[in-house]
Image (cartoon, rainbow, N blue to C red):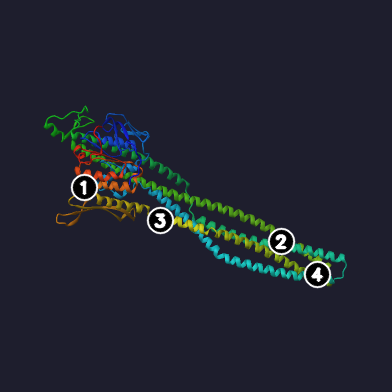
Amino acid sequence: MKQRGLTDSPLVHAENVGGIDETDVELAPGVNVLHGRNATNRTSFLQALMAAMGSDRVSLKGDADEGRVRLDVDGETYTRTLTRTGDTVAFGGDPYFDDPTLADLFAFLLEDNPARRAVATGGDLRELIMEPVDTASIQADIDRLEAEKREVEAELDDLDTLKQRLPTLEQRRTDLQDDIEQKRDALTELEAEIDEADADLDETRDSRSDLEATLEELRDVRSTLEEVRFDIETEKESLESLRSEKRETEADLDDVDAVDESRLDEIEAEIAELREQKQSLDSRTSELQNIIRFNEDRLEDAADGGLDLGADGDSAETGAPTDKLLSDESVTCWTCGSDVERDAIEATIDRLKESRSELLSDRRELDDRISALNDERADITDRRDRRDRLERSLEQTTQEIERREDRLADLEERRESLKAEVEQLETEVAELENETYEDILELHREANEVEFEIGRLEDDLASVESEIEEVESELGREEELQSRREEISEELVELRTRIDRIEEEAVEEFNDHMSSVLEILDYENLDRIWLERVETEVREGRRKVSKTEFELHIVRRTRSGTAYEDRVEHLSESEREVTGLVFALAGYLVHDVYEEVPVMLLDSLEAIDSERIARLVDYLREFADYLVVALLPEDAEALDDDYHRVTDI
């Protein structure tokens, strides 16, 4: 299961983090036990290690303006700086991770870890598991592949049409070859008749020579005239095709709505504004979290008796028992110095947490709005690009029509000129010919027409053979296109099911590990805790949509052996903590966190008895290179003596 990321014994140096003034701590591969009484900086050290790894869930020491952490491991040095700027803390340096999201969610399992708290507070378990998944990017990939698949299928449809046309072309080629052969046979017969007729003529050489020259010229002009007529017909067919294409393009253009470019500018401006709002919300959320964590730490220190937080902020041992009793009811405020009821401070912290939840809800709404604007921008851009393509195509088609109309006019003018020339030559022939030449002239006319027909048929044959070659070349791409279509289909299946698979794996991992953990922890009346992936319908605006949720089920068993389903809120604190840890472990495994994050941190296990803590640590140590757990001395005693111990921070 482990993916070894670190092999050395890391050395952590921290200054002014949490409650730490300055410390150096060396860790060892495997389990590291930080044990000591409350207010001995165990949690602060875990925060320091988190800071070095890249997390911002870290507090700066209350009386310091700057803090720093250095992590030396495997010959590399990672650094993190904390600088107070007004009411916030700015982070700098070169930490282990640029993006610590996975680690914060599923490896840094302190008391405020989102996965642990989601179980304890009834949060959205599915949303938490899916947070690291870039669903927008997956949908963009799906849209891109679907568009490509449509293009490939359109090309395959075109190939099917070509495939059906190929037999017709091949039959046309055969017919043309037969026609040419017949025409050549006819021409051979005519040439033989002409030779025989020429041998019988007894005319003067000069008269015969003039007539033959005129006939030759007439034949050439007629041949040219036929070629021009053929070109005219070809141009007319091309013009009709182009005009049809123009009408189709104009119809397509009418179907595409005009694009409001100003709307694109508005969308860009709105997205930029929403991102600024989101950044502001993130900053405020981080500030609130730091304030909440700071106040909770101070309350915990006051409760443990490690600090007497008077107006001067100095630490001192409490005195008489009466003083200790009163200290449970009131606390000296660490900001103004007055005595404040502990319940009032806790109520304030609760309100701060509610404010943070509201900010997170606002952030999700901003994400939804940004996603909707991105979709609208993509739609407008697609329509604009399509209009641009259609307008360019229409312009090119119009220009081609104009060019061919000009050529057609030139050809028609050329045809009229040739017709006049033929009439003139026919008149000259008529003047030269007499009854003796009438038969031979007819033979020459027939031979001339046959030669022209042969030439036209050969041109048609060349055109058909060229078209057959093009069709066969296009059909050669069919296998490649079919292969690509299959690849796209497989990629689409993988993308469309990726989210489902991650959800299913998360549920399966949670249920498997919860079963194992419950077995080793042996809660007497807790038979089973399991997740179920369910589809529910929720209303979004005016429509209902399907949404996936993770439902947590608890099955208890009475002493008589009767099983019944219980509610999450009825779990004991110990059971809730274990459930939260196992849920975080499920996310840790589903997202392969162990391949990137070499450490797992555990804190705030006081609700679990020491024997169970020992068994839980033995179970979790298999999943990380370094498992660092903060425990009270009595809890640490139950752990294996071979584990590395840290007592002085």
Inter-mark Cα distance, 1 to 4: 117 Å
For this view, does 607 lie left or right of residue 375? Answer: left
For disc 1, the marked residue is 575
Q: Could you say which disc has been placed on residue 415 in the image?
A: 2
Q: Mark 4 and 2 residues: CB-CB less than 8 Å, in contact?
A: no
Badge 3 crowding class, 10 Å Cα cut-off, few under 14, some 14 to 19, many 20 or more, is: few
Q: Where is residue 219, by image quadrant?
A: bottom right
Counting from the top left corner in percent of width and height, residue 516 is at 25, 50
Examine the rendered structure and indicate whether residue 573 appears above or below residue 334: below
Under circle 4, the secondary element is helix
Question: Residue at 29% of width from left, 38% of height from top?
Answer: 289
Mark 1: few/some/many CA within 10 Å (<14, 14-19, 20+): many
Residue 48 percent coordinates (x, y):
30, 35
Structural distance between the alpha carbons of marks 2 and 1: 100 Å
Apparent side of residue 197 relative to residue 85 in the rendered image (left or right) = right
Residue beneath disc 3: 493
N-terminal of the pair, mark 4 or mark 2, is 4
The numbered mark, 4 or 3, whose residue comes first in the sequence reads: 4
Residue at image x 14%, y 56%?
Answer: 560
SS class of the residue under badge 3?
helix
Q: How far, Cα to Cα, is label 4 from label 3?
A: 78 Å
**Residue 256, x across and y down, in percent:** 49, 54
Residue type highlighted by circle 3: Val
Q: Is residue 545 left or right of residue 246?
A: left
Report the mark closest to the observer, 2 or 3.
Answer: 3
Q: Say few, some or many: other residues with alpha carbon within 10 Å of mark 2 (under 14 / 14 to 19 / 20 or more).
A: some
